[in-house]
Amino acid sequence: MSSALARQMPPVQHAKVNGIDMAYYEVGPRGKGVPIVFCHGFPELAFSWRHQLKACEAAGVWAIAPDQRGYGLTSRPDAVTDYDLEHLTGDLVGLLDHVGADKAVFCGHDWGGLIVWMMPLMHPTRTAGVIGLNTPFMQRQPMDPIALMRMALGEDMYIVWFQKPGEADKALGADVDKTIRFFMRKAEAMATAPDAPTASALDPQGKAPEGQSTFAFRELLAQWDKSDTHGQLLNADELAAFVESFEATGFTGGINWYRNFTRNWERSADLPTRIDNLPCLMVMAELDAVLPPSAADGMEDRIGDLEKVLIKGSGHWTQQEKPDEVNRILLDWMARRFPA
């Protein structure tokens, strides 16, 4: 565990789940009430939820944040297929078994949002509720999403580029400090937003919205001067936690999640298309360029019990950029929907 992480997080714990060793951080009274499980995105860690863990601990709420498969102190299997939705959701079920929880509220941001919206579809008996942070519950695309993105946004679109073995891994890992600084910026500093977990920038017919970036950030990363401190999100100790972690692991584990888009699409054809009889919360960020509030339009037609809240002035890294607002919204919703 990096020294920067150790200074800023609760003691790390480990669980043997679903064929891997999963590192996780836990606060609050285990076994009391329904836990909330925080699921991070790319390129992130359980550390991304540090503010929420502190707030939950102070409020007496049982909360857990894992380093997910391929990240941080958790195992990084070699096979690309070991990072599909079946494995990623299965890891969370195994974590519940480990801590003795029948069900949990799953809260996810970025890629983690996609995972948590799959939990009631793939593991309904283990899901008490869902909170999507920036990432909405989306309709299944009418064709292979990689083919859609390639057709609408070109070969340089970052998710398409991620499909090429080794290329993005090498580019992002060449200067980890620069890569993390490039990603972890506030909305006003971002010329483009290369952090979307899905093809949410496309409508269901695969059309790119007018004025939308092509997300070809390879050249932007190469050309960006990391001495530019405008809009930097992290302080020195927070930056060190991310940099030390990704210098130790590289980015391949996280990128492998993207390399399962086609596989996930193929294997999801028979999943339910609605979420009913389950409390859900959608938290939107006003300035998220790739997962804007409009991406959540129509969710009410696919979810029977849904609340939506907008956080103004926030870009993509909402739980880190506006932690007090996120904490207030989450704890209020948990208190109302899952009272002690």
Image (cartoon, rainbow, N blue to C red):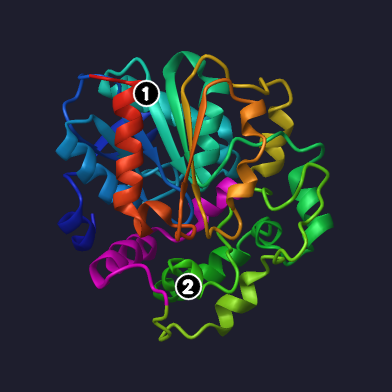
Q: Is residue 27 left or right of residue 270?
A: left
Residue 10 at x, y percent in the picture: 17, 45
Whether tag 2 and tag 1 are in contact, CB under 8 A, the answer is no
Residue 270 at x, y percent in the picture: 72, 20
Q: Residues within 10 Å of mark 1 (few under 14, many from 20)?
A: many
Amino acid under disc 1: Ala
Q: What stretch is highlighted in magenta?
A: 231-258
Is residue 291 located in the magenta-colored stretch of the structure? Answer: no
Residue 169 at x, y percent in the picture: 55, 63
Q: Is residue 179 left or right of residue 304?
A: left
Residue at x 44%, y 57% (from the top left corner): 317
Report the label total: 2
What residue did someone put label 2 on? Answer: 182
Question: Which of disc 1 and disc 2 is earlier in sequence?
Answer: 1
Q: Which of 264 and 76 is in front in this view?
A: 264
Residue 149, above or below 21: below
Is residue 240 located in the magenta-colored stretch of the structure? Answer: yes
Residue at x 69%, y 49% (from the top left corner): 199
Point out the image quarter for the C terminus: top left
Point out the image quarter for the N terminus: bottom left
Q: Which of 142 and 248 is in front in this view?
A: 142
Magenta: main secondary structure equals helix
Task: Identify the element where label 2 is drawn.
Answer: helix
Residue 271, above or below 233: above
Dividing the picture into quadrants, the one containing residue 15 is: top left
Task: Identify the element where label 1 is drawn.
Answer: strand
Q: Distance between the residues labelled 2 and 1?
A: 34 Å
Amino acid under disc 2: Phe
What residue did someone put label 1 on? Answer: 104
Q: Which of 169 and 93 is in front in this view?
A: 93
Residue 65 at x, y percent in the picture: 32, 40
